[in-house]
Image (cartoon, grey):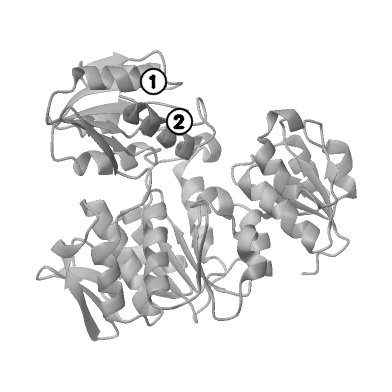
Amino acid sequence: MDYKDKKVLVIGMAKSGISSAALLCKLGADVTIYDVKKREDLPAELLHELDGHSYHDMLGQDPTEIVSDMDILVLSPGVPLGLPFIRKAYELEKRVIAEIELGFAVSKADFIAITGTNGKTTTTALTGEIFKNAGIPTHVLGNIGVPITQEAMQTQPGDVVVAETAALQLDTIEAYRPRESAILNITEDHLDRYGTMENYIAAKAKIFKNQTQEDYCVLNYDNGLVRGLEDQIRAGVVWFSALTIPPNGAYVADGIIRFSLDGEEIDIMPAQELRIPGRHNLENALAATALACLYGIPADVIANTLRTFPGVEHRIEFVRTVNGVTFINDSKGTNPDATLNAIRAMAAPTVLILGGYDKKSDFVPLYQAFTPMIKAVIVLGDTAGKLIDAAEECGYQNYIRATGFEDAVLKAYSIANEGDNVLLSPACASWDMFQNFEERGRIFKEIVNGL
């Protein structure tokens, strides 16, 4: 679509919104930016990225009256679709699209799109490394921290965009069509936005909405909710499994990571040589292997990357050992299932820091899954009371309520013994205290490095 002279309202002035506004200005659109926050309340370094561009400013104002004059609304991830002015836009039959839709429309690259409740960031980063190591010009973008709109104009035919694609970004896609897609898993999350699991699953399923028989969709054979989507998919379905040998896809047999397609098998490497720990990371590696094999990347390139990839920041990240206590940053653990994955990766007694913004998650199954390895829990944030109620319901008594984030870290350190872990894996979003999980993880590391 030609955006020149189109009147576009860009909503949400975080990274995605700023990048969308800058891209639209370059494309010659008549851009208006909006955020519920006033200009002085937004990070100055973000707004400086729009320096030199001409745009209209509706920051901190009500944009309802200008919606009728707009041709397009571009939404940043997480913007509620029920806002009055967005409802008005739909009533007026205005075009309402996601930031990833805009980036996809401008980009010339092939898209590899990865979604799932957990594991997206690790799998996206790992897949990106495999493609880079194969000599393919690769852009690792999306929910991983670099908006697609930031690099869309720089992509060329033959490039690949590996895109972490969250449900919140898929809500308003139109033509977004990845050459390969992957759904890693689906567990309870974002019920504050979607209300029901059915709505959440439907949002995830949009990742394959526009795919055709020429494309591939990689699914987790071991996750019932994901497996149940097969009949909705027009693309070729390829599986990954850590537990069995699926019809086509990536799996482990005789201790070897293998990929099979239409009767042809490729050995990749011994599973025990995978550098990143935990069964959930084996699943992530299998998904990345399937995506890479489908693109024709040689087995030795995949194997060398799996052996050397260290993981990603804020995801079961070793920080420091202080007086025999090991601190681990899993700020990316923003729902109970992600925290369970982190807990399962612990090989020593662990003090767990939980709590944050309430996404309407049920914490009872989290406590029920605890083993004696979790020696104590520190709770904080908006969900502290809910976490305590869940602990009481499960008969778990080893919890302490913190007054703030630093207090939580210090309390955890004070009760940890030599040889123990202190694990930040909050099972909640960060928005009650921080701008994002990255800021939460950085501050955790700053506190730990100051001990």
Residue 398 in the image: state x and y as whole percent.
20, 17
- Whether label 2 touches label 1, CB < 8 Å: no
Helix, strand or loop at label 1? It is helix
| Residue 393 visible in the picture | no
The quarter holding residue 182 reads bottom left
Residue 289 in the image: state x and y as whole percent.
31, 70
Crowd around label 1: few <14 · some 14–19 · many ≥20 (10 Å): some
Q: Which residue is mark 2?
A: 360
| Residue 219 visible in the picture | yes
In percent of the image, x 43 and y 27: which residue is there?
356
Residue type at mark 2? Lys
Q: Which residue is mark 1?
A: 406
The quarter holding residue 339 reads top left
Helix, strand or loop at label 2? It is loop
In percent of the image, x 33 and y 42: which residue is there?
338
Against 179, residue 428 (above or below) is above
Against 398, residue 92 (above or below) is below
Which dot, 2 or 1, sits closer to the camera?
Answer: 1
On-image quarter of the N terminus: bottom right
Label 2 vs 1, first from the N-terminus? 2
Residue 65 in the image: state x and y as whole percent.
88, 38
Against 275, residue 134 (above or below) is below
In percent of the image, x 34 and y 61: which residue is there?
227
Q: Nearer the viewer, residue 444 or 390?
A: 444
**Number of numbered markers:** 2
The mark found on residue 353 in the picture is: none
Q: Nearer the viewer, residue 442 or 123?
A: 442
